[in-house]
Image (cartoon, helix red, strand yellow):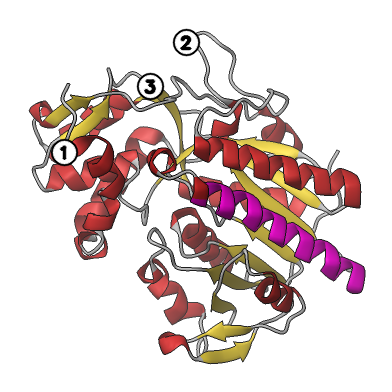
Amino acid sequence: MTDPAFTPNCVLVTGGAGFIGSNFVRWVLQQCPTTHVVNLDLLTYAANPESLADVVKRFGVGEDGRYYFVQGDIRDATAVTALLRGEGRETLPGGKSGRVVPRPDAIVHLAAESHVDRSIIGPAIFVDTNVRGTLTLLEASRTELARAPRPFRFLHVSTDEVYGSLGPTDAPFSETTPLAPNSPYSASKAGADLLVQAYRETFQLPILITRCSNNYGPYQFPEKLIPLMITRALRQESLPVYADGLNIRDWLHVEDHAAALWTVLARGRLGRVYNIGGESERANITVVRAILDYLGKPHSLIRFVKDRAGHDRRYAMDISRIRAELGWTPSHRFGEALCETVDWYVTNQDWWMRILSEAYRAATALYLDTSRA
């Protein structure tokens, strides 16, 4: 059983200049011709306005007009409150103010510190952004709905990492799997998940939670496994792989994820958690070798490095709930979509070449300069 279909006039997307966020913003504007999108993003290191250049050109001011960008912090209660009241203004180049943004009737909360390696180096910002930022959004939403009641949904986007690690023969994670995070990143996301659920139980806030598996596709910041390996291989650099490379992840194409998020937002049952996965389990070393083979690069570029602390061995997702209740299923085949992703990085080298020093920062700190197999 699902709740009645919900079609938002305006969606506030937090973190919409990031990897998943930019792809979701693009998907909504292309697929939902009556929906406006307000992108709230602080533009930290992993956010890249260039990822939305085509969106601005097609849907920004002077064109379709349904896309608004606001540079701001989800921890800023005053700014978030203004946006929820329809009193915020978009941010133009140079920091100037533009149009008044429309009042949103949904939040899709994607803004987060998300790289596990960085959470090992510096956990505090993960707790501050992922927990306190989520709390700020929840409290602002609760206050706004008390002031101006209306149909509204708060979709919190989480991760399979909150479930912990699976053994080689364990059943995939379901939505009832107990939370058992093992890294500062996943612990901060689990804390945010629990806050969201608490606001449902205590304040009846109309929330939904999704937990996704590892995303891949265009516009991903090249510190994550797949773009890190592609960009380093293209530069004839060594490809660092943790331990034996047999850690297993379930791979979800970002466009499939975007479609799933909209499906949950529009038709999901309030208060419900939905797992989103690609049903494409692969060992990391298998993915790395496939990238090298497609690029025609030698496997000798692979360099096994010391395993990271708290490294989960396997993730796998049971997506029977979202399939049965909402009819969503992934459409991308991993092998083909991985090759398409490699092609995108080959074609768009200007996009990633300018950010490599920041992209490699965590890798350099943890293993590139100091570790040996």
Is 95 positioned to the left or the right of 257 in the image?
Answer: left
Residue closest to the eye, 314 or 373: 373
Q: Could you tell me the amino acid type at mark 2?
A: Pro
**Which class describes the residues within 10 Å of circle 1: few (<14), some (14-19), or many (20+)?**
few
Residue 73 image point, x, y percent: 57, 68
Label 3 to label 2: alpha-carbon separation: 10 Å
Which residues lie in the magenta part? 125-149
The dot on residue 369 is: 1
Determine which residue is flagged by label 2: 168
- Label 2: element kind: loop
Label 2 to label 1: alpha-carbon separation: 32 Å
Residue 367 image point, x, y percent: 23, 34
- Label 3: element kind: loop
Asked whether disc 2 touches disc 1, contact meaning CB atoms under 8 Å apart, the reply is no
Rendered-image quadrant of the C terminus:
top left
Viewer can see residue 84: yes
Viewer can see residue 149: no
Q: Could you tell me the amino acid type at mark 1?
A: Asp
Determine which residue is flagged by label 3: 247
Is 154 positioned to the left or the right of 348 in the image?
Answer: right
Is 300 magenta? The answer is no
**Which class describes the residues within 10 Å of circle 3: few (<14), some (14-19), or many (20+)?**
some
Asked whether disc 3 touches disc 2, contact meaning CB atoms under 8 Å apart, the reply is no
